Image: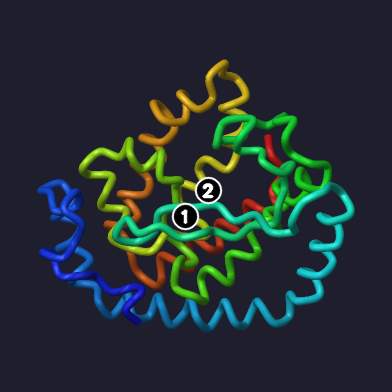
Amino acid sequence: MSNMLLWPWEKLPKNMQNESVRPYYESLKKKTAHLVCKRVIDIFFSILFIIPLLPIYLLVALAVKLDSKGPVLFRQERVKQFGKPFFILKYRTMVVDAQKIGAQVTAKNDSRVTRVGRFLRASRIDEIPQLFNVLKGDMTFVGTRPEVPRYVLHYSDEMRATLLLPPGVTGTASIAYRNENKLLEENEDPERTYIEKILPEKMAYNLDYLKKVSVKYDFIVMGRTVKCVFEKDE
């Protein structure tokens, strides 16, 4: 269960040992039982979902492969618990080397997104491979969505508190900003808009989640996520 439990304060990365992070750390230290249950639930449900979804994996993989050249899976370096790097898994929804020909955030009508990719993104099916990230312990079902290293560099001292726990497949910020690409589409410089406006706003949700962490609250967030998947975008 070490993937979920907190390190001793003095062993945290130096940039996390600040007075803005400490209140969140002390609060989470009192919720050890919840964190252990959270990891048990992650293992149980990731295995439960992976096995029956195997046929879907194969069908989606075939669709991705036939639609455009390149690998089926997209691996991108993100930042997880305690600021460690890991590779998040997704079905590839963009052309090969998309990161080299545009920003690391994606606007609604981004020309780099493939035809199959648009469907996978809209339905959230592209996120399914993250079940393996959860099983491994790099991620949890509910938490802060993991950022790429370059955006983590823009974290304030308080924002670094979100690195106390593994990143999530979904979370309150993910739900609130599920139409994030529409906001980015309206700006000439989407990356700057993301860093200066959207990232701080999302982090407010993520920090609030840290104060409410519990098994019950995680199930509430997962329920909201499922509801959002079936709702039509406005």
Identify the amino acid type marked 2: Ile
Q: Along the line of sight, which residue is nearer the eye, 83 or 170?
A: 83
Across and down, in percent, residue 171 comes to 47, 55
Q: Along the line of sight, which residue is nearer the eye, 76 or 43?
A: 76
Across and down, in percent, residue 216 comes to 41, 71
Examine the image and state in which quarter residue 201 appears. top left
Circle on res. 213:
none
Asked whether, in this view, residue 176 is left or right of residue 59, the answer is: left
Circle on res. 175:
2
Q: Name the residue located 67 percent from the left edge and 54 percent from the top edge.
A: 124
Quarter of the C terminus within the rendering: top right
Across and down, in percent, residue 228 comes to 62, 51
For residue 184, above or below residue 206: above
For residue 166, above or below residue 234: below
Q: Name the residue located 61 percent from the left edge and 30 percent from the top edge.
A: 102
Contact (Cβ within 8 Å) of mark 1 with mark 2: yes
Q: Name the residue located 57 percent from the left edge and 27 percent from the top edge.
A: 184
Asked whether, in this view, residue 109 is left or right of residue 107, the answer is: right
CA–CA distance in space, label 1 to label 2: 6 Å
> Mark 1 = which residue?
171
Across and down, in percent, residue 218 comes to 44, 66
Q: Along the line of sight, which residue is nearer the eye, 208 or 113?
A: 113
